[in-house]
Image (tube, helix red, strand yellow):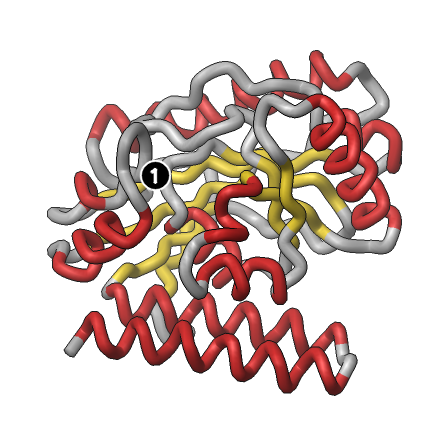
């Protein structure tokens, strides 16, 4: 039953996107996409914990990357656009949902594709959007990030908008099911997540970083900030109320 509910939600998302695209209301589109992400998390049985203050102005958001679930978690809390690997566009149903939601795509290892993605991100930032990139270049078993690449961060430097670091981690008895990396395929992994015990996703928001410095320096500072936000929860294995941030627990329906 749970698998069927998830499938129906995904198919319903396609129909909703089609109607919204005809209406041509960007604000309504962003809100409905956010609600779709929240409903998806609810169906998967994943709770969210937000730590810190969300940015309110255009910015480039950089985060460690553990799973396709990261998209649902961030998208359920913030009205953002994502940069994703081009392969996602070919995933069953998900690819059409991502494209309809305004996701930007890049072919990993293709310099010309990276140049186009850089220009697309810059244009989105100048248009007032918040754009999320995963500068590790791929998802990892984490939770600590591998080296942040600076290439796409250059878009923030060109657009003159700040960079905001996010730290993602998963907790609870089902946390081992959240990671999506290596030889995992999407359909099999989604089936395991559906059958997994309780998972709590934690999203910590860092301080904004001035993008007037070099992209390489911004990447270095952002990675350090993400590691600092992850260090306490990695050591204790669960979100801690003693962190120097405002912590708000969010139920899947909110």
Q: Is residue 65 visible?
A: yes
Quarter holding the C terminus is bottom left
Question: Number of labelled discs?
Answer: 1
Q: Position of residue 222 (x, y in %)?
A: 60, 24
Lateral position of residue 27 relative to residue 46, left or right:
right
Lateral position of residue 158 relative to residue 48, left or right:
right
Q: Residue at x 16, y 57 (%)?
A: 198
Could you say which is closer to the camera, residue 91 or residue 120?
91
Q: Is residue 243 above or below residue 125?
A: above
State the image quarter where residue 47 is shown. Answer: bottom left
Q: Position of residue 37 (x, y in %)?
A: 46, 66
Could you say which is closer to the camera, residue 206 or residue 89?
89
Q: Residue at x 56, y 19 (%)?
A: 148
Q: Residues within 10 Å of mark 1 (few under 14, many from 20)?
A: many
Could you say which is closer to the camera, residue 6 or residue 90?
90
Quarter holding the N terminus is bottom left
Q: Position of residue 119 (x, y in %)?
A: 82, 37
Q: Residue at x 65, y 70 (%)?
A: 30
Q: Give the residue pinned by disc 1.
A: 169
Q: Residue at x 86, y 54 (%)?
A: 127
Q: Is residue 210 visible?
A: no
Q: Is residue 39 above or below residue 156?
A: below
Lateral position of residue 146 relative to residue 205, left or right:
left
State the image quarter where residue 219 is shown. Answer: top right
């Amino acid at each position: 039953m749970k698998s069927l509910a998830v499938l129906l939600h995904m198919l319903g998302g396609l129909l909703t996107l089609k109607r919204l695209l005809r209406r041509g209301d960007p604000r309504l589109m962003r809100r409905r996409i956010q609600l779709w992400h929240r409903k998806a998390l609810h169906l998967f049985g994943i709770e969210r914990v937000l730590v810190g203050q969300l940015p309110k102005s255009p910015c480039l958001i950089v985060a460690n990357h553990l799973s396709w679930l990261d998209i649902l978690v961030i998208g359920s809390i913030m009205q953002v656009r994502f940069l994703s690997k081009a392969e996602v566009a070919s995933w069953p149903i998900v690819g059409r949902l991502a494209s309809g939601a305004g996701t930007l795509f890049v072919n990993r290892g293709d310099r010309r594709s990276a140049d186009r993605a850089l220009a697309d991100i810059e244009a989105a930032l100048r248009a007032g959007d918040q754009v999320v990139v995963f500068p590790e270049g791929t998802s990892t078993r984490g939770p600590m990030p591998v080296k942040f690449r600076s290439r796409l961060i250059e878009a923030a430097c060109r657009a003159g908008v700040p960079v905001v670091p996010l730290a993602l981690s998963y907790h609870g008895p089902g946390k081992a099911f959240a990671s999506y990396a290596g030889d995992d395929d999407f359909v099999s992994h989604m089936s395991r997540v559906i059958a997994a015990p309780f998972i709590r996703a934690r999203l910590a928001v860092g301080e904004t970083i001035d993008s007037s410095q070099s992209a390489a320096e911004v990447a270095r500072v952002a990675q350090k900030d993400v590691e600092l936000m992850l260090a306490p929860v990695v050591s204790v294995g669960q979100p801690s109320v003693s962190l120097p941030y405002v912590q708000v627990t969010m139920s899947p329906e909110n």
